[in-house]
């Protein structure tokens, strides 16, 4: 068995989680995620529908957050080009079961064709939900981004933004010095055009990720606390709060290993496995598209390069609705993060 130190050179390797499982179940597979699914009659895991089309527009970002599973940052060059976006549009046009296009990154707005892509989606499917995962600070990063709130409003875009906490200390420790203040200013700009305001029809949701090696608290309780604190202290309003469990991959895995929390965190995820959460995992109604057009079961699998199990159909140009609708979803032990406690997805708790 490799030591944890020996594995630090390959922190994106999905097999790195096996150490703690082998220690707990020597010589067997009882601790592996697929075995947990077998025990509740859900292996292989299969889709329920093709409803959410999640596209990663690139790994370039104006921030370098400690928990980022994309390993995004200003130095990343991977970016979705217009040809790949056109392939996305072809699928969105054909697949009428899709009811949501979820645009993520990095900072998706840093893609030079971001606005063109949003406008094309809206023209193609006027009633489809378009989500942008905005880090908030991008709105203030450059004068050319200052009108993003108005652009979102004009195109009926739902904004989902990360805000680790309602205090500067906890937010800045996870996302960088000064991020909290800039995030508040961006939220106020979004509020000014109607986002988060009752009756406006403009949805602004926040995302909470724990700042350490623990599971998020009750989503409902945190939402109530965030709403009160942000309104009372800063006059900021929003619609819903999503709690997302940090998965043991990329920068967060690096943190777990270097801080000595890896084994205890994996044990916590295993002990918190919830069959109801497993039934509602996001990979069952989502297709994740990489910046280069390759297809994945979820955004986390994308970062581990675990492509969909559809022979000959792992790229947008080979899209096969029937095969994707009946495929066996690729799982590994990082999936324990989505099935722990109340469950976790890009839309928050699942239970």
Image (cartoon, helix red, strand yellow):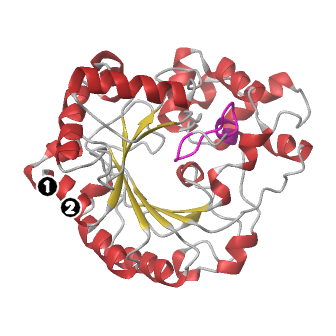
What is the spatial separation of the Cα atoms under label 2 and label 1, in whole angstroms? 6 Å
Is 155 placed left or right of 285 in the picture? left
Can residue 137 be seen here? Answer: yes
Q: Nearer the viewer, residue 229 or 159?
A: 229
Dot 1 falls on a residue whose secondary structure is loop
Dot 2 falls on a residue whose secondary structure is helix
- The circle drawn on residue 103 is none
Q: Give the residue drawn at x 54%, y 71%.
A: 98
Which image quadrant is residue 55 in? bottom left
Q: In the picture, which quadrant includes the N terminus? A: top right
Q: Nearer the viewer, residue 212 or 75?
A: 212
Q: In the picture, which quadrant includes the C terminus? A: top right
Q: Residues within 10 Å of mark 2 (few under 14, many from 20)?
A: some
Q: Which residue is mark 1?
A: 147
Q: Position of residue 326 (x, y in %)?
A: 76, 71
Can residue 1 be seen here? Answer: no
Which image quadrant is residue 325 in? bottom right
Q: Position of residue 26 (x, y in %)?
A: 89, 26
Residue 16, placed above or below residue 210: below
Q: Position of residue 207 (x, y in %)?
A: 43, 37
Q: Give the residue drawn at x 22%, y 32%.
A: 184
Residue range of the region highlighted in magenta in the rendering: 334-348
Q: Give the residue drawn at x 88%, y 27%.
A: 25
Q: Position of residue 258 (x, y in %)?
A: 52, 19
**Residue 206 included in the magenta stretch of the image:** no
Q: Main secondary structure of the magenta part?
A: loop
- The circle drawn on residue 151 is 2
Mark 2 and mark 1 residues within 8 Å of each other at the beta carbon: yes
């Amino acid at each position: 068995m490799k030591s944890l130190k020996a594995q630090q050179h390959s922190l994106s390797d999905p097999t790195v989680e096996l150490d703690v499982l082998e220690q707990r179940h020597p010589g067997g597979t009882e601790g592996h995620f697929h075995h947990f699914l077998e025990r509740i009659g859900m292996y292989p895991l299969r889709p329920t529908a093709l409803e959410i089309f999640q596209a990663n527009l690139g790994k370039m970002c104006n921030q370098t957050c400690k928990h980022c599973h994309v390993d995004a940052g200003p130095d990343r060059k991977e970016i979705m080009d217009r040809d790949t976006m056109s392939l996305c549009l072809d699928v969105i046009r054909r697949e009428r079961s899709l009811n949501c296009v979820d645009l993520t990154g990095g900072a998706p707005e840093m893609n030079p064709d971001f606005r063109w892509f949003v406008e094309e989606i809206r023209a193609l499917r006027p009633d489809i939900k378009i989500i942008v995962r905005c880090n908030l600070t991008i709105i203030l990063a450059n004068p050319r981004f200052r009108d993003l709130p108005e652009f979102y409003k004009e195109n009926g875009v739902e904004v989902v933004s990360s805000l680790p906490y309602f205090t500067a200390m906890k937010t800045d420790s996870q996302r960088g010095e000064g991020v909290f203040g800039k995030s508040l200013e961006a939220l106020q700009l979004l509020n000014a055009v109607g986002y988060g305001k009752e009756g406006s029809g403009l949805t602004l949701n926040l995302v909470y990720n724990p700042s350490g090696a623990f599971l998020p608290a009750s989503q409902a309780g945190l939402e109530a606390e965030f709403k009160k604190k942000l309104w009372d202290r800063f006059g900021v309003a929003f619609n819903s709060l999503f709690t997302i469990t940090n998965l043991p991959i990329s920068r967060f895995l690096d943190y777990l290993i270097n801080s000595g929390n890896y084994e205890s965190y994996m044990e916590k995820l295993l002990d918190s496995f919830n069959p109801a959460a497993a039934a509602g995992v996001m990979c069952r109604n989502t297709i994740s598209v990489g910046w280069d057009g390759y297809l994945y079961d979820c955004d986390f699998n994308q970062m581990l390069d675990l492509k969909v199990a559809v022979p000959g159909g792992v790229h947008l140009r080979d899209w096969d609705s029937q095969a994707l609708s009946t495929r066996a979803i690729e799982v590994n032990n990082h999936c324990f993060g989505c099935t722990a406690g109340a469950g976790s997805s890009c839309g928050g708790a699942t239970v």
